Amino acid sequence: MKSQKRIENIWLALEIGNSRLHWALFKGETLDLTWDTEHVPKSVIQQIAQCHTLDDWPTTVFPFSQQKEIVLETSTHPPIFIASVVPSQTKLWQIYPNVEIITLDQVPLLGMYPTLGIDRALALWGAGKIWGLPMLVIDAGTTLTFTGADINQCLVGGAILPGLGLQFSTLGQKTGQLPIVETKVITSLPPRFALNTPEAIQSGVIYTLIAGIKDFIEAWWSLFPKGKIAVKGGDHTLLINYFQALYPEIAASLIVEPNLIFWGMREIVMENSKYK
Ligand SMILES: Nc1ncnc2c1ncn2[C@@H]1O[C@H](COP(=O)(O)OP(=O)(O)OP(=O)(O)O)[C@@H](O)[C@H]1O
Ligand SMILES: CC(C)(CO)[C@@H](O)C(=O)NCCC(=O)O
Ligand SMILES: [K+]
């Protein structure tokens, strides 16, 4: 049975990434549900803007809208807080009647540069709030990013490189005879010296990626011997598995938390007492 009580402190967090959308439903400061969807076309956002409550949303965007055990008698147009690194998608969501875009100036980190990605700032802020500083966030998403802050909440800086999927797709797309390796077919470590094309691609990308990440981790620990490291992003499970196989002592000290950006968003939204 659905509760008849209207829940007034429901809010949605929407992280617009380069590959897909990441959603969270909060009741006050409690994270209730998370799910991922594709990027949404304008027509569907227009449809959502007409919906009064979440129950009416299309299941392609809110997969739980038909599930009776989820209490969704939300007030009209539950607020959506958006953190986006895709300006064209941000623009589309602005037709929703109750939307708030989270911007860099709302993140209390010091020393940020103006073009720093909001996802990097929020994940770092969220991780720092929960586990403490110094903190380095490794985001294994469309891109792979490193983003660190010191004990004074000051951005140390970081790095950006193509993520696992992007490395494979670029190799497949920009060459005459290389196939596109799908990350989902990879289960274990490939042979280092491979004797077929797909495994040669896997070997090259994976072993250099792991070596590169290990090098950044060691550089972080030489700057901050007690510095913490948190890992997130669509490819985090794969990367953690490789570290467990190759460098178990490093793997053991990594904090794995897919929801880092949502924790960062919660910190900022909770400043606004209306949703507590
Ligand atoms: N169901 C899925 N759909 C798409 N990508 C997936 C899925 N599951 C795992 N991945 C992996 O996640 C990676 C994308 O990561 P993620 O979803 O965190 O990126 P994003 O948040 O859209 O992008 P950004 O890096 O801009 O934040 C891809 O390289 C892919 O291998
Ligand atoms: C690096 C990405 C693509 C990671 O999602 C995003 O954070 C972004 O677009 N950043 C802007 C550039 C920067 O952070 O320096
Ligand atoms: K990323």
Image: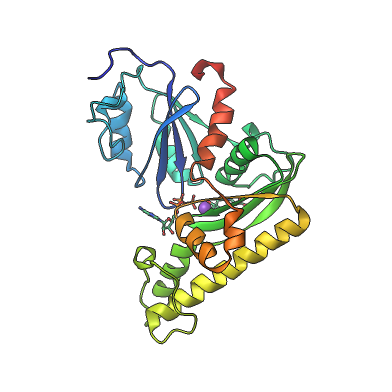
State the residue in front, 241 or 42: 241
At a point 41% along the width and 15% down the height, the residue shown is 8
Q: In this view, does 47 lie to the left or right of 31?
A: left
At a point 71% along the width and 57% down the height, the residue shown is 220
Q: In this view, does 205 lie to the left or right of 196?
A: right
Q: Where is residue 30 in the image (x, y as percent from the top left)?
A: 47, 26
User: Can residue 102 be spotted in the picture?
Assistant: no
At a point 48% along the width and 35% down the height, the residue shown is 82
Indicate the quadrant containing the N terminus: top left, top right, bottom left or bottom right: top left
Vertical order, 188 against 145 (above or below): below
User: Can residue 86 be spotted in the picture?
Assistant: yes
Give the farthest residue toward the top.
5
Q: Where is residue 244 in the image (x, y as percent from the top left)?
A: 52, 62
State the residue in front, 37 or 225: 225
Q: Is residue 201 left or right of residue 69?
A: right
At a point 28% along the width and 38% down the height, the residue shown is 43
Vertical order, 109 against 29 (above or below): below
Q: Position of residue 203 (x, y in %)?
A: 47, 76
The colour mode here is: rainbow
Q: Position of residue 69 (x, y in %)?
A: 26, 26
| Residue 98 falls in image quadrant | top left
Task: Count how many numbered circles sit on residues in the image.
Answer: 0
